[in-house]
Image (cartoon, coloured by chain):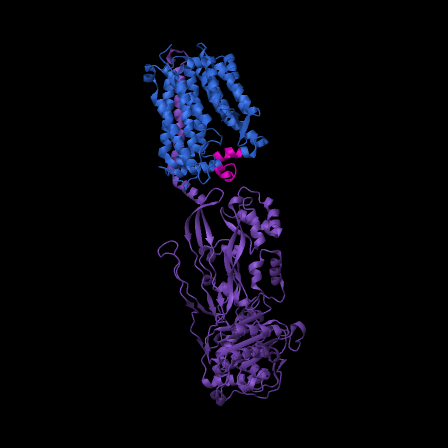
Amino acid sequence: MVAIIEKRDLKDFDWLTAVLAIAIASFGVWQIHNATPTEGYWSKQIIGILIALVAFIIVCFTDYRRLIDSAPIFYIGGLILLFLVLTPLGVQVNGQKAWVRLPIVGQFQPSEFVKIPTVLMLAKYFGARKAGNLRLREMLIGGAIFAGPVVLILLEPDAGQAITYFPILGAMFFLSGIKIRYVVLTVVAAAILIPVAWTVGVKTGKIKRYQQERILAITDPDSVDPRGYGYHTIQSTITVGKGGLAGNQGDTETSQSVLKFLPEPQTDFIFAVTAENTGFIGCVSLLLAYAILLSRMIAGAREASDRAGMLVIMSIVCGMVFQIFMNVGMALGVLPVIGVPLPLMSAGLSALLSTFVAIGFVVSVKLRRFVN
Amino acid sequence: MKIGDYVQKLGLRVGTIQVLAFILLTLLGVRLYYLQVVRGDYFSERAENQRVRFIPIPAPRGAIFDRNGKLLVDSRPTYNVVLSNEPLKSVNVADRVDTYSNGLSMDRQFVVERLSLIKKQNEFETMVLKENVGIEDITWVEAHSLEFPELRVELQPQRFYPLGTTLAHVLGYVGEISPNQLKEPEFQDKGFRPGDIVGKGGLEQYYDEYLRGRPGYRKVLVDSKGRVQSELEIVKPQAGQDLVSTIDLDIQNRAEKQLAESATKRGTIVAMDPNNGEMLAMASAPSFDPNIFVKGSSTPEGRQAIAAYWQDEKRPLYNRAIQGRYPPGSTWKLPESVAGLQQGAITVAHSNLVCGGGITIGNKFTRCMGSHGSPPLSFAITKSCDGYYYRLALKMGIDGVIKMVEDFGYDKRSGIDLPNEKVPQTPKSWMPYIVKNEGKWSDIRTVYSGIGQDTVVVTPISMLRAVASIGMRGKMYTPHFLKEFKAIPAVGTEGESDYFPARPAVGFAHPEPKILEATPDQWDLVIKGMWGVVNGGGTAGAIRIPNFEIAGKTGTAQVAELGKDVGDKKDHAWFVSFAPAYKPEIAVIALIENVGFGGSHAAPAVRGVYETYMSLHDNGTASPETVAKR
């Protein structure tokens, strides 16, 4: 596969997407260094990028259609990995059993990787369908494919990671011709049911005080104990605001993360670190870079030579948009604190690898847009 | 096969996703703009507030010395266990109570109070948990530094009163600023904070501003756990100014001893230099130990001792010299004699008034203690003839008595540099109430006012000041303890924020002496009478010291009705004096509570003070001129 890189491949290769992804990841390394200058996270991240690039190139020059054909194998492999997490091979970090340690490979987070096989499996199923509105039976089968990994992840339990799977299914349904009325119905139902569930939950005590506080820290920051569960949100907001227009450019003396006011600065709150160091200018540039990257990916989806390719790209796009919004929204104090990594930025080999592999698929799909 | 080929308007759907993605990113951008551009300064400040701390460096308080440089008060380094708020933020302090009280052997209740107090403070405040700790406590805190990061040991100077109960009322004591004081604008303006040490009572309070140093601070950078990361700035403290007082410790000790040896051990002895108002001694008994207030407030025993002081019926905390108000009895006859001459009720040539063994006002007879015929003024003083002064008061009239009250300053504080001085009560202050309640001021009250009873109660300091002015022939000085505050050099760099300017030496701001107008022969006459009290067979003849001529006056102040002077309600004994009679160097007053006659109880106490004075000064002999003058 890799051996037969044709000249035309290089010409059609989506350099901009690749460069943007690498640029964002490199920018991320700088921010990880800003977050924890005295620790090795940033150098590990560089190694991670190099490994991810190898995987990226392999995926780029592999025909995605062959990979989609083999999706069931990957999918079952993924489920096995997720199952391993629940066995004694699983490793507990920060009270969460989301990691697994294997010989040779080392320790990694299957829930990050299994997104790809899930996407492929769903793309294989929905990519084969004919024109016409999505039928209930198709939705149920799609839902079943989706439920496999998500249930296993919820059993870890890692609700934050499980949530990031939903946009994939949403994109699959939406782009497989689900009736608009169902979409509208879902949105309306959510708009009604969530507040109702909240009110009922608070009244009956089903939603615990500490769970409420995570939400209240957003909606009513003054009502929560600044030293309690609202602490992360408040400190993140302070860190972001402190950055101002131009940021304080790596000044470690006053750094919120170096002084440990900002929790998890190299992973969950990497955006707050970015905001502190590069200010409004840096943050907006980063968001623009994401926007361009996403646009390139969506353009690729439009040009995809088959339905499955389009679905792969769009579900990856939706997953990324969702993660970016959840993560940055959390850092900006508008969304509750849920441990969702910021794609390409947060320290962590598993997430980095899976994101680059996903982008590799996008490039691969684009490369083969003229092939039938 | 392109997207457009599908019939499900997939292009539109992909477009929808794209637009939605951009909307979400734009929302994030708007929020970023708000946080970073609109409110950036606010969050910068919040971030700074949580990472910068000011750790105070206490300033040594000025010491207090007597006039000869003997140490009266100073500060000693002690170790305190200090509690900081920050590491306790996520701790349920109830869990700490038993650990602290066992580990530091403290009263459980006190630990509870301190913990609840520190929780109420602003973030990052500190507070003393246990004062004056020993090596066991220091070791305990060090050993548990990881477990209890909120505790640390701090070196802090603590006030020490080496004399104990001696001079306690004059010196006062120091203590933590009270919550009520913190609410007063006077203290708020000066930036006082909870836990600050201020003078309470005595010179410590009156001259707190000078004695108190200016604390410095370390401005440090801390992490989220409050651990110091680096030092940003240090401002060194400036020590307070040393106070050199006018007190002569030898005379003070003698005065304390005289009180301790008195029959009831209750009373006051005050000595002053009549030439300038410098206080040589001021003893008030019973007394208290200021060290108990400094050390004791954190231990149950100390608190009990303090409570006992407050509840003691003998009132050890109260300074009898300036807060006690007693009927002056016959000592009142001295200012009255001067006033009688000044006002022309009597003259030097014709100073005789009838004694009559007493006087009848209406149908009530008020007796004199003796039968003195028709004595002249000096004899009336020497023998303390009540009958004479009944008539003198009547002759002066109540207006004349009030004029005298004003002339001798009995309607005001003496102006001594101690807090909480009381103003005497006199016919002047009583007049409005009496007239309101009784319709008029009756003659019998004027008669009583002539012998310092009924409507007259004065502080010993006001009496001493008035009588000293007779010795000075009309020059009335303001009594004071301050001789000088020593200069303190500047600290820090001029123009910088760490600069404390030098504090210059400060002396007592002597107000002009009040002048009482009388002719030399008038003064001579009164002083002659006073001389006679001790040296001319008068009421205090027993305390005569050869070659040191005391001029004085006894007083026996009625507590109960006349003649029923028994038990607890025995009369107060007064003796007020100066010496040498015709060139005074020292004026001394004694008041002993509930012991009986002034001549037999107060006068001997005063004599002891003069003896000490003489032993310190070889010039205690009367000069030939003064002897010749008689």
Question: What residue is drawn where x is 56% and y is 59%?
Answer: B295
Chain B shade: purple
Query: Where on the picture, by quarter, is residue B330?
Result: bottom right
Position of residue B280 measured from the top left corner of the image (x, y, whole percent): 51, 73
> Visible in this render: residue A272?
yes
Q: A335 or A46, which lies in front?
A: A46
Position of residue A326 measured from the top left corner of the image (x, y, whole percent): 45, 28
Range drawn in magenta: A212-231
Q: Magenta stretch containing residue B245, yes or no? A: no
Position of residue A127 measured from the top left corner of the image (x, y, whole percent): 44, 12
Chain A shade: blue
Instruction: State whether residue B18 is above or below residue B380.
Output: above
Position of residue B269 measured from the top left corner of the image (x, y, whole percent): 56, 74
Of the 4 image quadrants, the one containing the N terminus of chain B is: top left
Question: What residue is drawn where x is 35% and y is 24%?
Answer: A19
Question: What residue is drawn where x is 62% and y is 83%?
Answer: B369
Q: Main secondary structure of the magenta part?
A: helix
Q: Magenta stretch containing residue A227, yes or no? A: yes
Q: Point out the residue furthest to the front here.
A: A104
Question: What residue is drawn where x is 49% and y is 56%?
Answer: B184
Instruction: State whether residue A225 is above or below residue B191.
Output: above
Instruction: State whether residue B454 is above or below residue B222.
Output: below
Instruction: State whether residue B212 is above or below residue A223.
Output: below
All told, the count of numbered labels is: 0
Q: B192 or B504, which lies in front?
A: B504
> Visible in this render: residue B555?
no
Q: B49 or A114, which lies in front?
A: A114
